[in-house]
Amino acid sequence: LIFVCPAVMDSMVFLVLFAVSYGAGERGLTLTQGAWLGGLFQLTYLATSLTLGFLLSRRNAKALLVAGVAGSVVTAAVALVAQSFWPILIALAGFGIAAAFFFNSFQTFMRGEAPPGGLATAIRLKQLDAATSPAFAALVADRRGDVLSAQRKADAARSAYQQAWKAMDAK
């Protein structure tokens, strides 16, 4: 479930920026003001990401991740309900900062929670779960054995290799 968090946040960022940009015209903002809204979000996101590279560690990543989620929700809500340029601009700047906190701390947090290479192998196993065609059963089982072997799970790897062998034998 944790793997979908960045996708949910990406969707939220897109939808908030789209709604604010679309609503800018209805609120009577000029094209220049609309450009400032999007530009300041990007600028604060970039500056915060560069700064966080020096501040993040595995010890503070979880707290900053929670702060990023909470800050994103609050600043997004303010940006969506604000009616004039300055409150929207300030809210989107805060949204850029909070989104940077989320994405950067999420990566650091996942690196701290997973053993070296653990995240990549977990993703590989999920990808193999998606291959459901019987025609690929032997290949999928063989690759599953490779991933489990890389994780040093000898018994599970052996079982997967035996499944692959049986699936090849059936043909």
Image: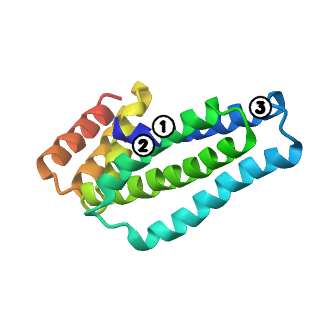
Residue at 60% across, 62% down: 46
CA gap between label 2 and label 1 equals 6 Å
Q: Quadrant of the N terminus?
A: top left
CA gap between label 3 and label 2 equals 24 Å
Which residue in the protein does label 3 denote?
Answer: 22
Say if residue 11 shows up in the picture: no
Report x, y in % for residue 43: 66, 60
Q: Quadrant of residue 59?
A: bottom left
Please tell me how crowded label 2 is: few (under 14), some (14-19), or many (20+) other residues with Cα within 10 Å. Answer: some
Assign a secondary structure to mark 1. Answer: helix
Which residue in the protein does label 2 denote?
Answer: 69
State if disc 1 and disc 2 touch (CB < 8 Å): yes
CA gap between label 3 and label 1 equals 19 Å
Which residue in the protein does label 1 denote?
Answer: 73
Assign a secondary structure to mark 3. Answer: helix
The mark that comes first in sequence, 3 or 2, is 3
Residue at 29% across, 51% down: 147
Report x, y in % for residue 100: 51, 55
**Name of the residue lying farthest toward the left:** 155
Say if residue 31 shows up in the picture: yes
Report x, y in % for residue 36: 77, 52
Q: Quadrant of the C terminus?
A: top left
The residue nearer to you, when weighing 122 against 103, is 103
